[in-house]
Amino acid sequence: MSKKLKIRFLVFLLLLSLPGTITAQELFTLNGMITDASSNETLIGVNLIIPEAGTGVVTNDYGYYSIKLPKGDYVIEISYIGYQSIRRSITLDADKKMDFQLNQSSEDLEEVVITSENPGLNIRKPEMSVNRLSINTIQRMPVVFGEVDVVKSLLLLPGVSNAGEGSSGFNVRGGTVDQNLILLDEATIFNSSHLFGLFSVFNPDAIKDLKLYKGGIPAEYGGRVSSVLDIYQRDGNSKEFKMQGGIGAISSRLLAEGPIVKDKGSFLIGGRSSYAHLFLKLTDNSNSAYFYDLNTKLSYKLNSSNKLLLSGYFGRDVFRISQNFDNTYGNAVLNLRWNHIFSDNIFTNLSAIYSDYYYGLTLNFVGFNWDSGIKNMNLKYDFNHYINDHLQLKYGIQNTYYEFNPGEIEPIDEDSGINYFKLTNKYAFENAFYISAEHDLSKKFSAEYGLRLSNFFRLGQKELNVYTNDNPVEYDEERGIYRESEILDTQSYSRSDILKSFTKLEPRIALAYTFDEKQSFKASYNRMTQYLHLISNTSSPTPLDVWTPSGPFIEPQILDQYAIGYFRNFQESTYSLELETFYKQIDNRIDYINGANLIANNAIERVVLNGESRAYGLEILFRKNTGKLTGWLGYTLSRSEQRTPGRTELEPGINNGNWYFSNYDKTHDVSLTGSYELSEKWQFNANFIYQTGLATTFPNGQYEYEGVTIPVYGERNGDRLPAYHRLDISATFEPKKNRDKKFKSYWNFGIYNVYNRKNAYSISFRENEDTDKNEAVRLSLFGIIPSITYNFKF
């Protein structure tokens, strides 16, 4: 995009925001908040439709709406899944503020839906490659050990997978775990897993809204190139004190909420902890593995135009083996927000955010402590500007400061044989400006388009290595391998120095053409830039993996993603179909030279090369939204590949410069989820998953050298693990279904992996001691696992 074209594009967007938009009729503004009648909890994504005007609006992330209409009489229809719909007649002859409160439906516990929006409205919106999961749906899904898990639930959606059972995080459309931006109340979560991937860090009782962007990502989001998982915590009940929780086989949770000042301020505090390790205390086993976390939120309404919110999360995992090994890691985030309504048309949110991921390791038998982590401080200011009923603008500015601690080794005592050693801290500053528009261009054609301008500054550090020709990795032609270049010198810089800077333009556009009220065609394109990299050469990241910023030797990753789709509702939205195909290309994807050592490496640039990756595929999501039987069928046909060609004609690159399957490639991925309401007391749920086995590299030969057998490997990821498949079932029983009773409870019974499939986590090769023949050994983590959980609220 030329400089002149960039300027024209920005001017075009700014002109759209001018108040001088000419209309033939005098327009008035209708605005307000939509909340839960029983708790005053703001509701996200509520549909407010005005049939006479043929238009509508959706509440934003803080429950606010605003729409401009000509003078006249209207009927307003307000709907939200899990709540009773309402209709109100109004006369609009001046600007008017109207707040609405919705009552929960009597069937809110039985709703099993993917989206909290009216499916008919989704047909028209240009939003695509986006999924929502209601908390009610997540709480009834069968999962391992019966522990409700947000991340595991996402794996049932098309285009979302992971690296196998017990693996951390999730992969979206063939991307890596570090390419997902995970936000909890706008704060970045760097590690989303407890107990090395068995559970996620998100307490379902504290969550209000969850949205996953796989593509068509709006301009307000940046910094990652694969997906955005945006999660908001509940504000807390400002009407009356409430408690809820659950007791499971290996963990329990408890959440309390209530008013600080009735109808004005509220608090929410929730805790969760595992306790399976306590049973080990009854034996002579001194090992333990457990987690705990805490969710908090305070909100206070100063007046009709101002509201303050303070939210936080703190979580820790502890893994201990006897008295020799002690591992502690986890996230801590804090966010102070100020919601302000400048006028009927402008809603703003100012956020000051702190995020910290910590990793600690103590090895008593060696005699040292290891600490590492990443911290960031983020100040952001976002605006929602409602121009008219056909045009809404979003714009804002974001500033983030990063501090990276790659690692610090400290001797435990004077007898330790380890010397103090500190890897060089790294620092960076990132800022961005964005502007985007949601625009109804005609009755059939709508668009969401925008531009994000991001800057990244790699700041000075105490030691920066100097290499010949600024090349930290050299190719040994004689041996035919890549190896680390010799460090010629080190230079020292102050924190105020800029080692390298990057400036990137990131255009976004999504279009929707509505054939009729039942079907539409959509397309999207987005470019995104990622300046942070997770240093890991495993398919599933571990807590010891560290983050590093782009800089003098590591370029930022750049994504271009295209998607087109067809969307249709059937039988008055009882059934719905979403069909999408996508293609994504990522430049500067990090790859590692053979034999790369990543742990405690103070010069990580000496073992990495810049490559590229690509992924493309077809996603199908067919849903049944209403009735006693609800659920969905998801299918993904895709390919994910990576390559790192040689930098010159003399270099072969990685894998001879050829494309090879990434660690996250799965040709076929099928998920079937269903829920059946047998009666008022009993509900049954089931999940079935089938996936192509993960790509891996097996030895294809061997030779002996000085009595040692050495395996010979072929091309990278030229083999595959066996196919993965599993069936899970659960039943929910509510013994006394009395809607008027304050104390409510229900039981959840589940069986994970019903037919005891021994899915391969990995396959290793060894020589059989009895037969002296080579053999493959399959490692499986989970067989059949029954579970029971008791849930309550009052």
Image: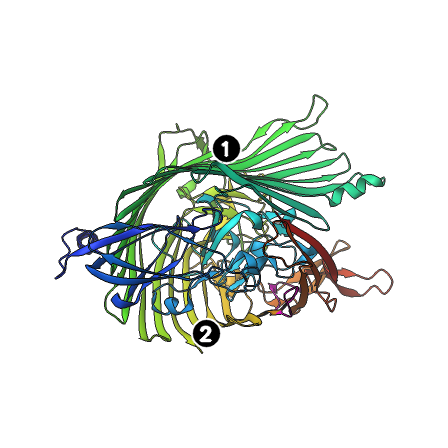
Residue 17 is left or right of residue 233, and the answer is left
Q: Is residue 311 visible?
A: no
Res 424 label = 1
Q: Amino acid at mark 2?
A: Leu
Identified at 61% across, 60% down, the residue is 140
Q: Nearer the viewer, mark 1 or mark 2?
A: 2
- Look at the image and say whether residue 564 sits in the magenta stretch: no
Horizontal and vertical percent for residue 246?
66, 49
Res 791 label = none
Could you classify mark 1 by the number of other residues whose Cα lies within 10 Å: few (under 14), some (14-19), or many (20 or more)? some
Q: Main secondary structure of the magenta part?
A: strand
User: Depth check: 159 or 301 in front?
Assistant: 301
Horizontal and vertical percent for residue 289?
71, 43
User: Depth check: 274 or 10 in front?
Assistant: 274
Please give the range of residues in magenta.
Answer: 677-700
Q: Amino acid at mark 1?
A: Thr
Q: Is residue 652 above or below residue 635?
A: above
Q: Is residue 66 visible?
A: yes
Q: Identify the residue position indicated by label 2 in the image.
A: 577
Of the image marks 1 and 2, the number of the one nearer the N terminus: 1
Could you classify mark 2 by the number of other residues whose Cα lies within 10 Å: few (under 14), some (14-19), or many (20 or more)? some
Q: How many marks?
A: 2
Identified at 26% across, 67% down, the residue is 52
Q: Quadrant of the N terminus?
A: bottom left
Q: Is residue 559 above or below residue 536?
A: below
- Residue at the outermost bottom position: 571
Secondary structure at badge 1 equals loop
Give the CA separation, mark 1 to mark 2: 52 Å
- Look at the image and say whether residue 695 sits in the magenta stretch: yes
